[in-house]
C-alpha cells in the first residue's frame, strides 16, 4: 500500500479539473501542467501547484513525457493521472512513470500495450469465448488473399487500422470492385496517421448500436462491471450523446455483456478503470470491438447511476487497495444522460467556432452536473479538442432525464461562439431518440441544419401575436421601456410563451 499524497494531472480542460476535485476531496495535493495557451485555465487556478510545459501545440507541451516526469521528481509528486487522450494510452509513458518510482493511475504498461492494438486485443481475448465481429485476425499483408476473405464475410466490409482511435482510421468498402483501392488507401492512411500500417477487415454491421461496459479491477485480481453506457448517437464514429442504462439492454443481456467485459479485462490482468466496447446488431447480438484502458469521456453517466466516484476508485486501486465493493453491491439507480458541448457550428457542417466566451452561465439544479474547464470571458484555444463541457443529468427514469436535459440545455447560456447545444436539443426531442429505437446512423438519417430553425405551432403563433400587441400598447403608453421589464435581464421568450 502506498498512500498518494501528491498527484500530478497530465492533462487539461474539464478532465484535469474533474480529477483534481476528487483528489482534493481525498486530501491529496494537486499539481497541474499547462501550455502557454492554458495559462489562465481553471485547472491551473484550482491546482495547489502548476508547471508550465511549453508552447501551445500538444507535442511541445502535454505530450512531453520526460518534462512531465522531471516535474514530478522536482515537486516530489508520487502519482500521475493521465486523464483521457494525450499520454493516457501510451504504454511507453506508463512504463517510464513506474520506472521513475511514480505511481501511474491506470493499468499496467503491458495491458495498455495489448489493448492499444485492436488486433492484439482480439487475439488476447479470443481464448475466452468472447463474441467477435467476423473478420481477419491478423494484419493484412496479402491483398488478394484478403479479397477472398472479404467475399466470404460478405460486403459491405470495414477496413480498420489496428492502431486507430478517436473514430479515425476506418473505411467502408461497399463492393468487391472497390476493395483494392480502398485497401491501399487505408494502409497508407494508417501509416501516416498512426505510424503503423497494420489494417484488418471486419464485417460492416449496417444498423449497429455502440454499447460499452465500464469495468474496474484491483491489483489483487478482482474485476467488476459497472453496467453499460449507450453511445450510439455519433458523428463521424465519435460519440456525441451518451446515456446509462441503455433503453434496449435487458437484465439478462446486461449480465452477459458485463461478464464478457470482465473476461476481456481478466485476459490482460487488468487493474484500474477501463471500458470494453461492443457493437450490437439489430438482433441484439453483441460483439467485442476494443478496450479503452483509461477513464472515458462519458464516465459521469456511470457515476450518476451507480453513485460511485470512478476517479476515487482509480486512485484507491492505484494505491494498492482492494476494491471496496463486489459485483453484488452494485446496482442501477435511475437514468443519466450526457451531452458533449462542442465549440462547433451545427448550422455550418460542425466547423470549429473558436473564440471568446462572452456569456457563460451554467444550468443548475438537482441532478444537473456540468463538467467543464472554462469561465465567462475566457477564450477557447484552437490547439486542442473543441469540447467546452459535458452536461450531465440524472433522474428517476429515462423520460424524466430527457425532459431535465432539454430544460438544462435551455438554461445553459453561451454567447460569443456557436455551440452544439441546439443540435443536442434536436436529438433529445426527436421521436427516434425518445422511443429508444435508433442506431449509429441517427445523425445522418435525421439531422440537417434546417431542423434547428424554430418552427412555431399555431398556438405559439397566436401567443406571439398577442404578446406583440401587448408590447406595442405598453410602449405607446410608455409605462415600461421595452426590454427593460426585468431590470435589463435577458427575457426568456420560451418561458413567457408557455
Ligand atoms: P471516449 O472513447 O472516451 O468515449 P473519444 O473516443 O472521443 O472518447 O476519445 C477521447 C479522447 O482521446 C479524444 O480527445 C480523442 O480525440 C482522443 N483519442 C482517442 N484515441 C486516440 C488515438 N488513437 N489517437 C489520437 N487521439 C485519440
Ligand atoms: P475507435 O478506436 O476509433 O473508437 P472502434 O472500433 O471503437 O474505434 O469504433 C468506433 C465506431 O465505429 C463504433 O462506435 C461504431 O460506430 C463504428 N464501428 C466500428 N466497427 C464497426 C463495424 N464492424 N460495423 C459497423 N460500425 C462499426
Ligand atoms: Mg472505440
Image (tube, rainbow, N blue to C red):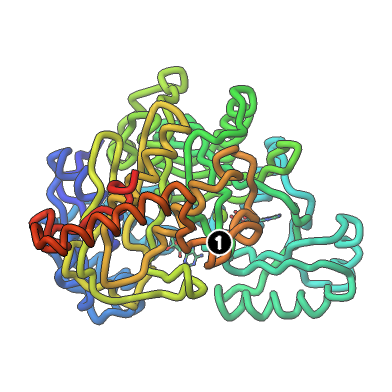
252 or 29: nearer the viewer? 252
Q: Quadrant of the C terminus?
A: top left
Residue located at (55% from left, 48% from top): 430
Residue 246: x and y in percent read: 55, 36
Residue placed under numbered mark 1 in the picture: 235
Residue 86: x and y in percent read: 38, 65
Q: Quadrant of residue 403?
A: top left
Q: Quadrant of the N terminus?
A: top left
State whether residue 42 is above or below residue 123: below
Residue 464: x and y in percent read: 35, 54
Ligand 2 neighbours mark 1 (CB distance < 8 Å): no
391 or 476: nearer the viewer? 476
Q: Residues within 10 Å of mark 1 (few under 14, many from 20)?
A: some
Residue 146 placement, left or right of 481: right
The secondary element bearing badge 1 is classed as: strand
12 or 324: nearer the viewer? 12
Q: Quadrant of residue 193?
A: bottom right
Residue 489 placement, left or right of 346: left
**Ligand 2 image position (quadrant):** bottom right
Residue located at (71% from left, 79% from top): 185
Number of numbered discs visible in the structure rendering: 1
Residue located at (48% from left, 57% from top): 455
Q: Is residue 49 visible?
A: no
Q: Is residue 359 visible?
A: yes
Residue located at (23% from left, 69% from top): 357
Outermost residue on the top side: it is 328
Residue 180: x and y in percent read: 83, 77
State whether residue 380 is above or below residue 275: below
Amino acid at each position: 500500500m502506498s498512500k498518494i499524497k501528491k498527484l500530478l494531472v497530465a492533462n487539461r480542460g474539464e478532465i484535469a479539473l474533474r480529477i483534481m476535485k476528487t483528489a482534493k476531496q481525498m486530501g491529496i495535493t494537486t499539481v497541474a501542467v499547462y501550455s502557454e495557451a492554458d495559462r489562465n485555465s481553471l485547472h491551473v487556478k484550482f491546482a495547489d501547484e502548476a508547471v508550465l510545459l511549453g508552447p501551445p501545440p500538444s507535442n511541445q507541451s502535454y505530450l512531453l513525457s520526460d518534462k512531465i516526469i522531471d516535474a514530478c521528481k522536482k515537486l516530489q509528486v508520487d502519482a500521475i493521472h493521465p486523464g483521457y487522450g494525450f499520454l493516457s494510452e501510451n504504454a511507453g509513458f506508463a512504463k517510464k512513470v513506474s520506472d521513475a518510482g511514480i505511481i501511474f493511475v491506470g493499468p499496467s504498461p503491458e495491458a495498455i500495450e495489448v489493448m492499444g492494438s485492436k488486433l492484439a486485443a482480439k487475439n488476447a481475448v479470443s481464448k475466452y469465448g468472447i463474441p467477435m465481429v467476423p473478420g481477419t485476425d491478423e494484419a493484412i499483408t496479402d491483398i488478394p488473399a484478403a479479397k477472398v476473405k472479404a467475399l466470404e464475410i460478405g460486403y459491405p466490409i470495414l477496413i480498420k487500422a489496428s492502431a486507430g482511435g478517436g473514430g479515425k482510421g476506418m473505411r467502408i468498402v461497399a463492393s468487391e470492385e472497390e476493395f483494392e483501392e480502398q485497401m491501399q488507401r487505408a494502409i497508407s492512411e494508417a501509416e501516416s496517421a498512426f505510424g503503423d500500417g497494420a489494417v484488418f477487415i471486419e464485417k460492416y454491421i449496417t444498423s449497429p448500436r455502440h454499447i460499452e461496459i465500464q469495468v474496474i479491477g484491483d491489483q489483487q485480481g478482482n474485476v467488476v462491471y459497472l453496467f453499460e453506457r449507450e453511445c450510439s448517437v455519433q458523428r463521424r464514429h465519435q460519440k456525441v450523446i451518451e446515456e446509462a442504462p441503455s433503453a434496449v439492454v435487458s437484465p439478462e443481456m446486461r449480465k452477459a455483456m458485463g461478464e464478457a467485459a470482465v473476461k476481456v479485462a481478466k485476459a490482460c490482468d487488468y487493474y484500474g478503470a477501463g471500458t470494453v466496447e461492443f457493437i450490437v446488431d439489430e438482433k441484439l447480438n453483441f460483439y467485442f470491438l476494443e478496450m479503452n484502458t483509461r477513464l472515458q469521456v462519458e464516465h459521469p453517466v456511470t457515476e450518476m447511476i451507480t453513485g460511485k466516484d470512478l476517479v476515487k476508485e482509480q486512485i484507491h486501486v492505484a494505491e494498492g487497495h482492494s476494491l471496496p465493493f463486489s459485483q453484488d453491491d452494485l446496482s442501477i439507480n435511475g437514468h443519466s444522460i450526457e451531452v458533449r458541448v462542442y465549440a462547433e457550428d451545427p448550422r455550418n457542417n460542425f466547423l470549429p467556432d473558436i473564440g471568446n466566451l462572452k456569456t457563460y452561465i451554467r444550468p443548475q439544479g438537482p441532478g444537473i452536473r456540468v463538467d467543464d474547464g472554462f469561465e465567462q470571458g475566457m477564450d477557447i484555444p484552437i490547439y486542442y479538442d473543441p469540447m467546452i463541457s459535458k452536461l450531465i443529468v440524472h433522474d428517476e427514469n429515462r423520460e424524466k432525464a430527457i425532459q431535465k436535459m432539454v430544460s438544462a440545455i435551455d438554461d445553459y447560456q453561451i454567447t460569443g461562439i456557436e455551440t452544439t447545444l441546439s443540435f443536442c436539443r434536436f436529438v433529445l426531442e426527436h421521436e427516434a431518440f425518445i422511443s429508444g429505437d435508433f442506431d449509429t446512423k441517427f445523425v445522418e438519417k435525421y439531422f440537417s441544419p434546417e431542423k434547428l430553425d424554430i418552427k412555431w405551432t399555431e398556438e405559439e403563433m397566436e401567443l406571439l401575436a398577442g404578446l406583440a400587441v401587448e408590447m406595442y400598447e405598453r410602449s405607446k403608453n410608455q409605462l415600461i421601456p421595452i426590454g427593460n421589464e426585468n431590470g435589463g435581464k435577458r427575457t426568456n421568450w420560451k418561458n413567457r410563451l408557455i
